[in-house]
Image (tube, rainbow, N blue to C red):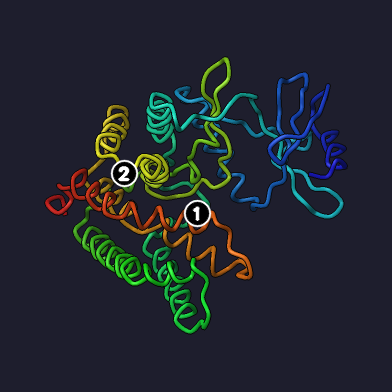
Amino acid sequence: MNDRAVELLEQYEIEVLRTRKGRGAIVCDTNRGCLIFREYSGSQERIELQNRLLKQIMDAGTVKVEVIIPSREGTLFVRDNEGTKYVLKTWREGRECSIQDKEECMEAVRLLARLHGCMELPADCLNLPVAFSPEKEYDKHNRELKRVRKYLQQKGQKTWFEISLRGAFDPFLEQALSVTEEWGQYQREATQGGKSGDTAKIAFCHGDYQYHNIIQDGRGWFLVNFEKCMCDNPVRDLCLLMRKLLEKNNWSISLGEELLETYEKERPLSAGSRIDLYYRLAYPEKFWKIANFYYNSGKAWIPRKNQEKLEKVIAQEKEKQHFLDQVFREVGRLR
């Protein structure tokens, strides 16, 4: 961040004692405690929604989260001379949640369940965003996968990574298409059958719930970076957290069951949400990320890390399918 951005802090009703760089932002010691000042790329509508949800979560008092500090003029962000937007938020200096510590992972799941209990807004609220459509997102992913496969088919001399990627492509693409079709069919049937859930309230999720955004200091846990909050089934967050933990633990059935049990002790999942979670986990998201990153980046030199990620996804596929069959064996009946 440009040091000149520090001058923008004069637009806030705070006394800045000291500033330092951290996490791509400016950390500020002030008379109002530790704050963080960073660039903001979203819209006015998005930050207003974010602010509303954060206030609601704070009022509930079950989870500690960041708070957006308004400027003297009452705006939620300020601009520099070039039009770049910046937002000032409360901050705690601590460490990220350790994905190596099982109890911390379980606490992250408990926090998530409590968070979701505070992230519903009345359906008649003005200016609510359009609900996220997983089917549209995965349709887009599938088109991208087909584009990458076509590119690999037409490419002449291939690197070892490209040979490995092409060799694994067809089964993963078939899986992606199958999951998308099944999930879309279920959603249409659920809508026609009136199973879409409580329409009096609209659920929101954090949008990027991973260990980087779960901070612990001497006062406990603190959740940050709600910029990607969106109108979607809260299992979106649970899926992201579970996938990251399970990939690092070779899709352990016992770990997956314990994560789900821990979440449901705080916030039971409906049959529809369990089905939703199953399809989100079943989609080959990691393979899509690897293929899409490859296609959209320079191909003159492919990092060894990409090959390692691909090999891990291929090696874990059998364990992942076994995990889904065992942990979500009731999904067929629920449908």
Amino acid type, label 2: Trp
Residue 251: assigned label: 2
Residue identifier under label 1: 129
Q: Tally the marks.
A: 2
Q: How far across and down, in percent of the image, does residue 52 sit?
A: 55, 38
Residue 252: assigned label: none
First along the sequence among labels 1 and 2: 1
On screen, residue 70 versus residue 145, left or right, reads: right
Q: How far across and down, in percent of the image, does residue 6 sit?
A: 84, 37
Q: Secondary structure at mark 2?
A: loop
Q: Residue at x 79, y 33 (%)?
A: 72
Quadrant of the drawing holding the N terminus: top right
Residue 29 in view of the camera: yes
- Quadrant position of residue 93: top right
Judged by depth in the image, the label closer to the viewer, 1 or 2, is 2
Up/down of 81 relative to 252, above or below: below
Q: How far across and down, in percent of the image, does residue 264 sit?
A: 28, 32
